[in-house]
Amino acid sequence: MAETAARRAPQVHEARVLRTERITPHMVRLVLGGEGLASFAPEGFTDHYVKVVFPVPGVAYPEPFDMARIREELPRDQWPSNRTYTVRSWDAVHRELVIDFVVHGDEGLAGPWAARVRPGETVRLLGPGGGYAPDPAADWHLLAGDESALPAIAASLEHMPVGARVHAFVEISGPEEEQKIATPDGVTVTWLHRGARPVGEALIAAVRDLDFPEGVVHAFVHGEAGAVRELRRHLRLERGVPRERLSISGYWRLGKSDEAWREIKRDWNAEVEREQEA
């Protein structure tokens, strides 16, 4: 039996904040650049992501920055935290990387940081990773998610093949959170205003109520894990969508911190797969 290849450590990039913009009441856009992004090389996906590194205040890390070395040499309470964010866009010519952050006041780690960071500050990124891009051979496309998936959905819409047939659903808190997105001719985004309803309820209902077109679908469904679980069950079992035609995962879990969700996510996904394949 061949040995399993060692998992490659993610590349480290040191970027500089060039500009910040609050594009909606709860979404802040950061434009990053600098020579530290010279080796940044996405591979053609529309759900590219990076991990934003947050050092522990007062801790000096070895240079060059190396997460493996840090974990070997420093106690766990001195390891930097990281948060995963989708790349909204990447301009290789001008070397500008755009990332959108959901911000809810002082809640969380990355959101408050994005709201207060200023041009000129530096930030370390790990990545990029990714795995989805709209299949030009598909007969139609389904894009569904909440605010956390909006950057990837927007990027996917902007890279749809000419003439693509698309149903795009985005659940947000209210009309003030809608964004302008460049979409193919004839394609519109269905904005689902959550209001006081539980997260994911409107999204689940919209996908369930959709009159599915004929032909092969390529679906991207990401967001709160509980809602994603319901939609995965619906698409796989009730709609009969093959697993290979789905990009589907929980970006976050209601009631769980980012660290707590990452600790259980792999097992949770495996449990859901077993449940829906039984």
Image (tube, rainbow, N blue to C red):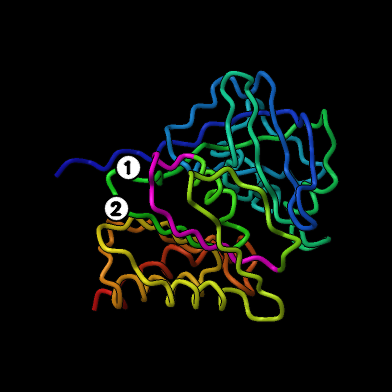
The residue type indicated by label 2 comes to Asp
Residue shown at the point (38%, 55%) measured from the top left: 141
| Camera sees residue 271 | no
Q: Quadrant of the N terminus?
A: top left
What's the distance in space between the residues labelled 1 and 2, CA to CA?
A: 8 Å
Residue nearest the viewer, comparing 148 with 182: 182
Query: Where is 216 relative to 33, above or below?
Result: below
Q: Is residue 168 magenta?
A: yes
Expressed as whole percent of the image width and height from the top left, the position of residue 134 reads: 39, 46
| Camera sees residue 158 | yes
39 left or right, relative to 175: left
Which range of residues does the magenta coloring cover? Answer: 159-173
Query: Where is 110 relative to 248, above or below?
Result: above
Crowd tier of the residue under label 1, counting other residues whose Cα lies within 10 Å: few below 14, some 14–19, many 20 or above? some
- The residue labelled by disc 2 is 139
Residue shown at the point (71%, 45%) measured from the top left: 54
**Image quadrant of residue 68?**
top right
27 left or right, relative to 274: right
